[in-house]
Image (spheres, coloured by chain):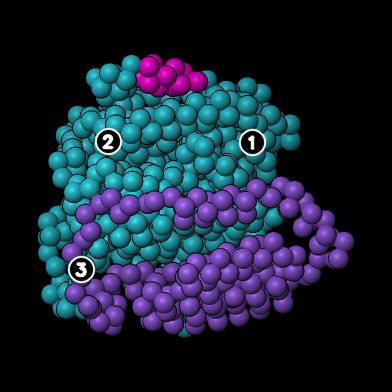
Chain colours: A purple, B cyan
């Protein structure tokens, strides 16, 4: 029951995020959605994943979004209304599909129609991260480097000739 | 020591970005050129001393095993060749040292991503390296911050993000079923519960994500904008290898290593392949924009790869992989030629061009070789791979698809000949009297790629038996 309520609140938060007119409110809505996902992860006994979700998605990414929004020129009130009306007219069916899919999936009797894998032994997260997923850590370093070059390249001022 | 193929470039990037920038900017080009050349040589000669041995001290810190089969070698070779070509033309198109330096860094990062995709044995690691390739591609498309390029990059980001969400969802479902993310564990779990709806859903979602990454119909919307608006070296990279590795190679690897060829999968692949061939060919016919026409041509040719692969037979898979390599070469060559023309003329509108072969003989001649190979004219490389695909379709009783593949080749010849006539033959366009041949980087890259196209065609028996035929082993796994 509690899980269903949390999931419904999460969907409402996500819908508000994409439908709100203000970019800043959308960033806050994303933080709120991530915070609710954190609660779900705690309830699913994944405290470390929840902590990562809270610190990175709710905290760091929201800070990055708010900083980027502060660098952009805001739309006028008239432009904002025109964009949001147009958007509602074009994409009204998407939230309807999401909500209907959620209702259909929860009402349907999905069976675990496969052989469950043997229960894995409890592994220390540090062991998994540093010894078993080294290649993924390496990949993360490379993605961060790519992001750094992206910022350097795309935010570089053009030289005056 | 295959891990050196991704560790050495990373070490190089870190060293290149130390202080002493002036020296490092000059060294960056030669470092990248050596990296790609070494990758080409290792992939061609595949000496067991490199591919089989491990570095003991490294293994203590970096315990990873990689896939090393003939499919990996062919794709690593394609990555090396196309990246080197892109690097060579960057020297001509990017005159600002800082801009070229940043491009080279991003090119090396993209090649790390692509090499990683080709070598990993784990579905989550595959996703991580796909993201490396995607992130570096977004930045490269928007590199020069032109308005249209930013729009193209934005479309690519959105569709790529949708593809990523689909793949991650599929990976989560596969992990639920298998308990792990390695190819072997997932394959075992799928074999045990092959009729599970959860597994079928995961397969379907994963394949949709890969169709988006590969730019296949009906998910091809981002391809013409991204290819045509990106800077010249980036168009070569995108069209030549990025979509092939991140979409098509991954599809081939995942299907042969994890999912297998069920009736449903072969039907979907045949339909998507045919749709891509026809939509791409018909859309290319009506184009005036040189690069946009080549983008639609790419969609069509990638459809041949999927069509061959969709037969599910050894011959079909061999034809698909061979066409993947050939397409990487001749499509890169066509994009290099279009970039050379655009740089000299300042326009991509083919209706304003004409008679350029007199002023740009190398570009014109290599363009003829590329278009003949694309259309499947003997004895060039493209002919052999298309013939193998058509024979595979016929032998697997897919007669209608074989006929469509042959007829679409005629369409391909039609629009490419039309391009050649408009751009290179006939009377010289107005105002182009003073144009000259493209700079050295363009000429070297185009002559090298044209030589490969001719060489692979003429020496087909050797190439086929040494490099292509051993790939059939991937179906035995």
Q: Is residue B280 left or right of residue A88?
A: left
Q: Do marks 3 and 2 share a chain?
A: no
Q: Chain of mark 3?
A: A
Report the residue marked by disc 3.
A119
Residue B262, label in figure: 2
Q: Secondary structure at mark 3?
A: loop
Residue closest to the far right: A78
Q: Is residue B421 left or right of residue A56?
A: right
The reply to whether discs 3 and 1 touch (Cβ–Cβ < 8 Å) is no
Rendered location of residue B189, percent (x, y): 21, 53
Q: Is residue B406 magenta?
A: yes
Foreground tag (1 vs 2): 2
Rendered location of residue B381, percent (x, y): 33, 30
Marks 3 and 1, how far apart at CA:
58 Å
Residue at image position (61%, 80%) is A63
Residue at image position (18%, 52%) is B188
Q: Is residue B339 magenta?
A: no
Is any atom of residue A88 visible in this view? Answer: yes
Marks 3 and 2, how far apart at CA:
29 Å
Residue B252, label in figure: none
Q: Is residue B359 left or right of residue B366?
A: right
Of the two numbered discs 1 and 2 on the same chain, state the one appearing first in sequence: 2
Residue at image position (67%, 69%) is A26
The reply to whether discs 1 and 2 touch (Cβ–Cβ < 8 Å) is no
Residue B289, label in figure: 1
Is any atom of residue B305 visible in this view? Answer: no
Marks 1 and 2, how far apart at CA:
40 Å
Magenta stretch bounds: B400-411
The residue nearer to you, when weighing A63 against A150, is A63
């Amino acid at each position: 029951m509690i899980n269903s309520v949390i999931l419904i609140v999460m969907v409402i938060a996500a819908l508000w995020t994409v439908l709100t007119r203000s970019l800043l409110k959308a960033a806050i809505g994303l933080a709120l959605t991530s915070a609710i996902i954190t609660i779900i992860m705690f309830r699913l006994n994944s405290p470390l994943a929840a902590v990562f979700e809270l610190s990175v998605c709710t905290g760091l990414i929201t800070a990055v979004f708010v900083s980027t929004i502060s660098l952009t020129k805001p739309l006028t009130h008239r432009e904002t209304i025109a964009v949001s009306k147009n958007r509602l007219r074009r994409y009204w069916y998407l939230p309807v599909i999401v909500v209907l899919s959620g209702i259909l999936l929860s009402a349907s009797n999905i069976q675990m129609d496969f052989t469950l894998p043997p229960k894995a032994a409890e592994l220390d997260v540090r062991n998994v991260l540093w010894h078993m997923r080294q290649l993924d850590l390496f990949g993360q370093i490379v993605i961060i480097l790519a992001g750094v070059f992206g910022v350097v390249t795309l935010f570089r001022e053009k030289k005056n000739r | 020591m295959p891990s050196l193929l991704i560790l050495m470039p990373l070490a190089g990037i870190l060293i290149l970005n130390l202080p002493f920038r002036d020296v490092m900017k000059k060294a960056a080009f030669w470092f990248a050129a050596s990296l790609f050349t070494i990758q080409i040589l290792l992939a061609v000669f595949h000496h067991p001393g490199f591919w089989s041995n491990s570095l003991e001290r490294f293994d203590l810190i970096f315990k990873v095993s990689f896939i090393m089969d003939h499919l990996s070698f062919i794709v690593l070779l394609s990555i090396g060749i196309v990246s080197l070509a892109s690097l060579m033309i960057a020297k001509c198109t990017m005159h600002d040292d800082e801009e070229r330096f940043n491009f080279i860094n991003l090119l090396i990062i993209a090649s790390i991503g692509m090499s990683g995709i080709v070598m990993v044995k784990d579905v989550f690691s595959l996703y991580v390296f796909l993201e490396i390739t995607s992130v570096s591609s977004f930045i490269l498309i928007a590199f020069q911050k032109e308005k249209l390029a930013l729009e193209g990059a934005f479309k690519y980001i959105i569709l790529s993000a949708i593809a990523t969400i689909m793949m991650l969802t599929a990976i989560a479902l596969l992990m639920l079923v298998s308990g792990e993310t390695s190819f072997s564990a997932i394959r075992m779990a799928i074999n045990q519960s092959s009729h599970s709806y959860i597994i079928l859903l995961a397969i379907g979602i994963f394949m949709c994500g890969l169709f988006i990454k590969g730019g296949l119909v009906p998910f091809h919307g981002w391809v013409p904008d991204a290819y045509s608006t990106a800077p010249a070296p980036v168009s070569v990279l995108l069209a030549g290898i990025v979509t092939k590795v991140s979409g098509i190679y991954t599809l081939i690897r995942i299907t042969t290593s994890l999912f297998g060829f069920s009736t449903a999968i072969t039907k979907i692949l045949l339909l998507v392949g045919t749709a891509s061939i026809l939509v791409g060919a018909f859309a290319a016919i009506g184009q005036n924009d040189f690069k946009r026409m080549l983008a639609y041509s790419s969609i069509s040719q990638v459809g041949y790869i999927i069509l061959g692969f969709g037969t599910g037979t050894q011959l079909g898979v061999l034809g698909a992989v061979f066409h993947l390599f050939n397409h990487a070469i001749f499509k890169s060559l066509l994009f290099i030629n279009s970039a050379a023309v655009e740089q000299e003329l300042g326009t991509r509108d083919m209706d304003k061009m004409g008679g350029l072969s007199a002023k740009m003989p190398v570009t014109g001649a290599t363009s003829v070789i590329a278009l003949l190979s694309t259309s499947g004219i003997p004895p060039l490389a493209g002919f052999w791979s298309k013939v193998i695909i058509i024979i595979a379709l016929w032998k697997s009783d897919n007669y209608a698809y074989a006929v469509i593949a042959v007829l679409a080749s005629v369409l391909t010849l039609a629009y490419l000949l039309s391009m050649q006539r408009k751009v290179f033959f006939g009377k010289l366009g107005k105002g182009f009297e003073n144009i000259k041949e493209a700079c050295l980087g363009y000429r070297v890259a185009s002559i090298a790629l044209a030589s490969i196209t001719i060489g692979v065609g003429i020496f087909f028996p050797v190439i086929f038996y040494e490099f292509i035929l051993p790939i059939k082993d991937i179906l035995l796994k």
